[in-house]
Image (tube, grey):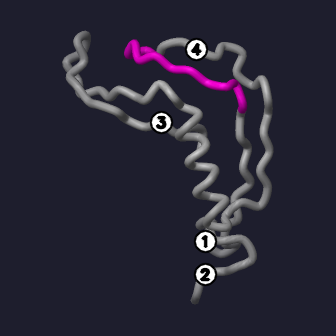
Amino acid sequence: MGSAAFDIGVELSRTTGEVTHHISPDGDAERDLLVAGLTKGGHVLELRWVDGFHKELAGTNGGGDPGRTDGRLATVEVATSAATGVPTPSGSEPAR
C-alpha cells in the first residue's frame, strides 16, 4: 500500500463537475491507525520508520485541501500466506 487518507467530505468539482473528495489534513493519524491495526492483528513481520522522509511538512493537494505531516515514513513488512498471498497473522496459516 502506498498511502492512506481519511475522506472528510465529497462535492462536485468546480473545475470538472465530477464527484471529488476532501481528505483530513492529518495524514499521519491515518498512517498511525493503519500501522497500529496491522500490528494489533499480528500481521507485521517488521516495522521500520524513516525520519525526515518528507522534506515539505505542510502544503495543499490538487484539490486545495491543506495537509501536514511529521515527515516520517513507516515501512511495514506484512505476513502473508505462501499459498494465497493474503495477509495472515504472523506465525499462522489460514485453515484449509
- Contact (CB < 8 A) between labels 2 and 1? yes
Q: Does dot 4 land on a helix, a strand or a loop?
A: strand
- The residue positioned 47% from the left and 25% from the top of the image is 25
First in sequence, mark 3 or 2: give its number: 3
Front of the two marks 1 and 3: 3
Tell me which residue sits at (74%, 54%) in the image. 77
Q: Which residue is mark 3?
A: 5
Image height check: is 92 above or below 49? below
Q: Where does the C terminus fall, quadrant-wise? A: bottom right
Decide whether the magenta segment is chiefly helix, strand or loop.
loop
Residue at left offset 67%, top offset 67%: 42
Report, in whole angstroms, how far the alpha carbon at label 2 lies from the one at label 1. 9 Å
- Do residues under tags 1 and 3 come within 8 Å of each other at their CB atoms? no
Q: Tag on residue 76?
A: none
Pinpoint residue 89: horizontal percent, then vertical percent.
Answer: 66, 71
Q: Nearer the viewer, mark 3 or mark 2?
A: 3
* Residue assigned mark 4: 58
> Which residue occupies the extreme bottom position in the image?
96
In magenta, the rendered stretch is: 61-72
Question: Which of the pair 21/41 is nearer the observer?
Answer: 41
Q: Is residue 2 magenta?
A: no
Q: As shown in the figure, which amino acid type bears the numbered disc 2?
A: Pro
- From the image, tell me which residue sits under label 2: 94
Q: Position of residue 4 (x, y in %)?
A: 52, 39
> Is residue 15 toward the left or the right of residue 47 in the image?
left
Instruction: Indicate which label's residue lies in the foreground, 1 or 4.
Output: 4
